[in-house]
Image: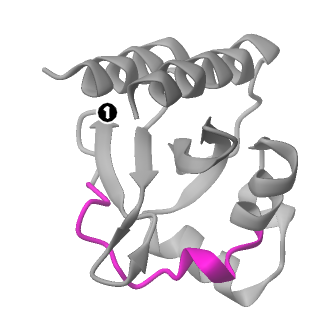
Amino acid sequence: MTEVQSILQALLAETRASRVTLRRGVSDGYVFPVTDEALAPGVASLKEERTVDLRAQPVVREVQRRGQVVQEDCLAANDDPAFQQMLETYGGLAAQIVTAVVAEGSLAAIVSVHQLGSPRRWSKDEAYACRLAAARLAELL
């Protein structure tokens, strides 16, 4: 297991979430594809998903400004049609923590913790764990 994978697996275990993804770079014209992920049993991978244009997603724009976005109820968080379609495409994404991975002063990657099925309350410790994981990942990229 790579160090990146170990960080994602640890974050998945700590948050008891459904999925943790790391998105970085550009692949075949797709901005920030999922390059690494950790999945709870029975949760589908997003590695091959290419229908959601992240450049059009409000969460990506917000994470670029604020560094981290915590959503406890994604359905209620934003009524943007592209965002609502993304929730469905990602398997019923109900809650998420999205954190910027900043290396050399710019957005190098995005780490996301997903809860599928039902909204949930994220603790301050879980949000902090995401920021720590992002900092560790920034050192590796």
Q: Quadrant of residue 54?
A: bottom right
Q: Is residue 76 left or right of residue 26?
A: right
Q: Which residues are magenta?
A: 45-58
* Magenta portion: prevailing SS class: loop
Q: Does residue 71 appear in this view?
A: no
Give the residue displayed 18% in from the left and 23% down from the top: 2
Amino acid type, residue under disc 1 in the picture: Ala
- Could you tell me residue 24's position as x and y percent? 42, 54
Give the residue displayed 78% in from the left and 42% down from the top: 67
- Could you tell me residue 83's position as x and y percent? 68, 76
Quarter holding the N terminus?
Answer: top left
Mark 1 secondary-structure assignment: loop
Q: Is residue 42 left or right of residue 73?
A: left
Depicted 71 relative to depicted 6: above or below: below
Give the residue displayed 74% in from the left and 62% down from the top: 59
Badge 1 is on which residue?
40
